[in-house]
Structures are given as structure tokens and as C-alpha cells.
Image (spheres, rainbow, N blue to C red):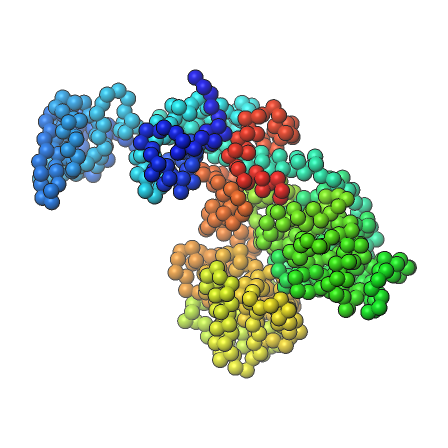
Amino acid sequence: MKVRSLAELAGIRLADTKIRGLGPKFAAALERAGIVTVADLLLHVPRRYIDRRRVEPIADLQVGDEVTVLGTVRSISSRRIRGARVLVEARVADESGSLRVTWFNQEYRVRQLPPGTEVALFGTVDSFRGRLQLTNPVTEPIRGELTKTGRLVPIYPSVSGVPTWRIQQWIEHALPHARPLVDPVPEAVRRRVGVVDRDRAIADIHFPDGEAAARQARARLVFDELFRLEVALALQKRRQIDEARGFAHPTRGPLVSAFLAGLPFDLTVAQRRVLDEIEADLAMEHPMHRLLQGDVGSGKTVVAVAALLTGVDGGWQGAVMAPTEVLAAQHYLAIRDLLDLAGLTPPEIGEGERLGMGSLFGGDEGPAVRLALLTGAQVAANFCPGARREDVLAWIADGTVDLVVGTHALIQEGVGFARLGVAVVDEQHRFGALQRATLRDKATEIDPDLLIMTATPIPRTLSMTLYGDLEVSVLDELPPGRTPIETKALSRTEEEAAWETVRRAVAEGRQAFVVCPLVDDSPKVEAASATAEFERLQTVFPDLRLGLIHGQLPPREKEEVMAAFRAGHVDVLVATTVIEVGIDVPNATVIVIEDADRFGLSQLHQLRGRVGRGRHPGMCILLADPATAEGRARIDAMVATTDGFVLAEEDLRIRGQGTVFGARQSGMGDLRLADILSDFEVLVEARREAFALVESDPHLERHPELATEVRRMLGDAVEWLFVS
């Protein structure tokens, strides 16, 4: 008997098999649902079971009972009734009595069940003219082992165009040909985790002897899914260590020390802890791969600049890549001001001093950091007010620039670094893995240390799956001075109260945002919506100065609008979600989010973070009439807490893991059974075992079946992990 592996079955297409009853039409329907291979079919597991083991004597039956009856056919006949239908009627008896059984339009039952046939019937008891009967029961002549009655019967998730009973039939036919299955998980691991072997689990998940067998089968397959994923992450981390060209940076050099000493505030305990973690990474010979999570306003920028300056202290360049022009410009201004406070701003040069920059900064002016901005539409440098694009590109290439902040422009052809050593990717979920890899490849001498930042808190469950190959640091403390934000939900009929709050804030010298609803996924439609709302609000606020910003504006116009808002020349900024990240205007204290139930929870939290950034309390008003339970749940969660990590867990609970995973590249959402919330303890075990196994066998040379399965079952997801 040939022993097969799940990886082998994942290479056999259903369309190429001879499974009874599975023709091209059904194979195409299954393929549309993602069931392409034999492995896919066997892993299309039941969503529930019907217990058909309750066998009752006929004399004890009650109307409404869902039962299995075992008896003998005493008589059977058929006749035509109204509507050209055929009624088949039988009398079935056991030792205790008899009952009437009827089937509609099933004439073959007369041939299938001649008098004297032993039969098992499953259905719900009803009555006809005062006598008990079963109507259209599941029917199975008894010729050996029962497969449709007298046991737990699997009910499968529906597939469009395919009856679930056919799926059961195909699996029943495929299982004997697929088994026995080799188990790629070492026996010692199975024993420690307490799971049954693979072959038994695949059989029992479909046709269990009882509830306990079904539970054990599910537990094993859940472990398999999470273990495969964690093995892939462990391999990726091992590969990063083995193949990377790293550099051990000296820490707390003169630039970092001057920068930290020049801050006008004390670092929080969380910032000091995270900075210690990052510096420990930078002191290692292999490159840092760290995810920095921090809620809105937690002080990630300060930590990131300290990390970048550690590289500059050692003679390397640093780069910050942000997803939008607005955010990149905001970072440039913030870093420029922080360097200025620390006395690290270099002397300015004039129009005629652009050439020979290296020699210009070779004097004894003291430590300084040359900072530049490079986006698709903007360039700037803190040492040259009139910097041109060709100047900035040349200064990055020859090493004159120490730190550069930019957008995707940093990874375009024609942008070269002299000695890139530390890279920061902000709001990492806006970038693909290949874009991050392209930035890394801009380094020529070493693989740069990589710090990935996000202000969208990631639940621990996701950080252990999506980002399990990265070390994770969390800024879970807000700096002193951040004012509280009150969140209020109003219905559309109460919107005048929202506008009154805006008027009151402006009268007190403050500013406000009004965020327009998400009409659909089209930026052009969204821009039109924002423009229409801008025009409407001019009648609502005839005496206020309104500005408009949306994604369809040219980059220079966007920056002009933001500059006017920062300078206080605009009272109310009407915007789309272009302001979701990176906007830091301490004087803005009110944000009104229209049709807030259309926004995701993390997006609402990011938008709320645009206010409360100064000395004055912030107010977030959610204008919404939620039409769905999910929309209402998001609004209620926003009102209940301002803790981004609590909201992240709630978002995952509301939307489900499939939505969250689906937003990522490739096949990471392919968790058929595992739920990373309810199966979190299994995830922890799977991670521990996977990383220990890869530590002892870094290339899975002693576990070839597991190596093959990880690649085959995760597919493109593995390739993504290997460039992340």
C-alpha cells in the first residue's frame, strides 16, 4: 500500500482524477471555490455534523423527534397525485410497531426497497391523519456498514453549484485512495502537543466515530495549519541571519547622545525600553528586522530617529520611506525640528556652493546631520534652502546626505545611496514586501538594518502570524502632555450639534477637520464627494475659512493646503482619508467623521489621532446611522475606548481573520480551520515547536516531508516570506 503525503496530494488536480461522479462541470465549480487539488478536497472539512445515531423503537416515536429508525419494509407502492407528482408510500415495521413513510418524486424507491428489505431511515417525525409518519427521510438499505444513517454525518460548507451530499460522496471515494498519509510532524512534537497522527485526523474529521474523535481531528488539523505557517516564518528568520551581510554598529555615539540630550521632554519608560531593544539589535553583526508598533502619538518618530543616527554615527546613511507625500513631508519637518533642537543642524550653503559638498562639511563646526526630502513632487535639504532635485540625488549618491526621507521615490531607478546602513519603513502595511526589499537592495556594502513601523496596532495574534519572522517592539505608553480625546456618536439628524462644536472650537482659536465619507473604492469618486461636501459646508460655515484636500489634488497643491492649515490660515479642513496618517497640527482639536460606520475600525482610530495632539483636549464626533450590526459594533467600540490595541483585537473579532489576512499579500489567509483568536494557545504552542525545530534543523534537511509540505501548501506565501 503506497504511503502518500499531503504535499503530494496538493499536486494532484481534481480535474485529473477519476473520482466517481466528479466530472468537468463539478470540478470547475470546485475550482472556483478554491478546491483545486485532492488535498484541497480532503481539507474541505465539515462545518458541523448531524447525529444520526439515535435509533428509536417505532412505538416510542413522538412528533418532532429527529431520529434514525431501523426496520423492515412490509409494503411499498407508488401513485400519481396532483401536479403530475409521484407519491411513493411504504409501511416500515420493527418489533415494536410500524409507521408510514412517504417520498415525493422518488419512484426508484419502489425498486430499491422491495418488501422484506432491511432499511435505515433518518428524518423528523410528523403526523398524517392522526398517525405518525416520516416524509422524504434520508434512506439507506442495510447491506453492511451504514454510511448515511446511524452515525455522525458530515455537513460541508456550501459550494455554489455543488450539493453538499456530492462533496461527501467524493471525499468518501477519495479517502481510501489517499490513505495512509505520512505524518511530517515529528512524533516527539505530536506527543508534547498532544495531537493524533495526520492519517487518523484526516479520516476522523470527515467520518468520526463520535464527538471526541471529531474534536481530536480538528485539534490536529488546526495545529497543522499554524505549525506550517510558523515553520515558514522560522525558516525566513533563520535565512535572514544566515545570509545577511550585517554590521555591528557602535551605540550611543555623539550624534545619538546629542539628539537625546536636546529633546525638550523626557523619554517615556516605553520609549527607553524600545530604544534599548533596537540598540541591542544594531550592535549585532546580523541586520535588524524589527517591527515597531506604537499607538497614535506614542513617540515612534523619536525612537526611529535615534536608530537612524546610530547608523550615521558609524558613517552610514539612513532612510525613511513613507507611503504618502503628505506623511513624508511631515516626517521631514518633524525630524528637521528635532535635529535643530539638539543643535545638529548643519550650516546653510548658498546657491554657488553646491559642488564639492564633502569638503564643505569637513571643518570643525561640530556634529551635524545633513537631512533631505525626496518625493515625486518635492525636494528639500536642511542645509540648502534652494536645493534642486538633481542636487539631492547627487548628495544621496555621494554620501553628502546623512538622512533622507521620501516616498516610493527612494526606490526608483536612478536613486543610489553611497552607504545605506539603516532603513525605516513607516506605515508598513501601505507597502508591498517587494518594495521593502527594493529599498534594502539600494544598499551596496551591507544589508541595512530594517525598522518597520506602524501606528495601526496589530493584535498579538497577528504579529505572531503575519510578522512572526520579525522581532516586535511595542510603545504601549503615551508621552506626558498628550491630552485626552472624547469620542461622541451622533446620528445624521443631530449633525447640527457637530457643526456647533466646530464653531465653538474655532471661536476659541482652535481648528477642525471634517472627513468625508467613503463613497466607494474610487479615488475620483471620493474626491468628487469631498468637493461636493466642501461646497455644502461653505453654506454651513459662511463666516469660517475652509480648505479642501483629497487624493486627486496635485502633490504641490496638497502641501500648500496643509501648510495653510498648519499656519492657522484655514479654520476647517474638509478632507478624505488622505489625512489618516502623518498630519500633526496641535491646534486642531475637533474632527467630525461623516458616515463613520463605512470606515474600518483601525482607520477610524487613525483619523481620531489627528486631534488631541496639543495642550487642548480633543473631540472626535462620529456622524453615522449604522445600517448593519458590524457598523454599529465599530461605532460602539470607538466610543468605548481610545486604546488602539484594544480596538485592534475588537476589529479582528468583528471582521474575522479572513478579512485581515486577505488584506495581505498572497496566501496568508489560507487558514481553513484555525481561528487565531479562539486557537491562540495552539498558536503559541505551534510557534514554540516550529522555532525549536528550525533551530535544530535550520534547512529541514532531517525533515524533508515537512519542507516540501510548507512550500507546497503555502505556495506564494512562502515566496513572500522569503523577501519580507
| Vertical comparison of 402 with 536: above or below | above
Residue 522: image x %, image y %?
A: 49, 61
Residue 590: image x %, image y %?
A: 56, 69
Which residue is nearer to you in this view: 684 or 10?
10
Q: Can see residue 125? A: no
Residue at image location 78% in from the left, 51% down from the top: 418
Q: Is residue 399 left or right of residue 498?
A: right
Q: Can see residue 128? A: yes
Which residue is nearer to you in this view: 328 or 708?
708
Quadrant of the image occupied by residue 672 = top left
| Vertical comparison of 459 with 559: above or below | above
Residue 554: image x %, image y %?
A: 60, 68
Quadrant of the image occupied by residue 557 = bottom right
Residue 157: image x %, image y %?
A: 36, 40
Residue at image location 69% in from the left, 46% down from the top: 441
Which residue is nearer to you in this view: 26 or 254?
26
Q: Is residue 630 left or right of residue 397?
A: left
Which residue is nearer to you in this view: 315 or 343?
315
Quadrant of the image occupied by residue 705 = top right
Residue at image location 60% in from the left, 60% down from the top: 581
Of all residues, the one furthest to the right in this rendering is 364
Q: Quadrant of the N terminus?
A: top left
Residue at image location 79% in from the left, 45% down from the top: 249
Q: Quadrant of the C terminus?
A: top right
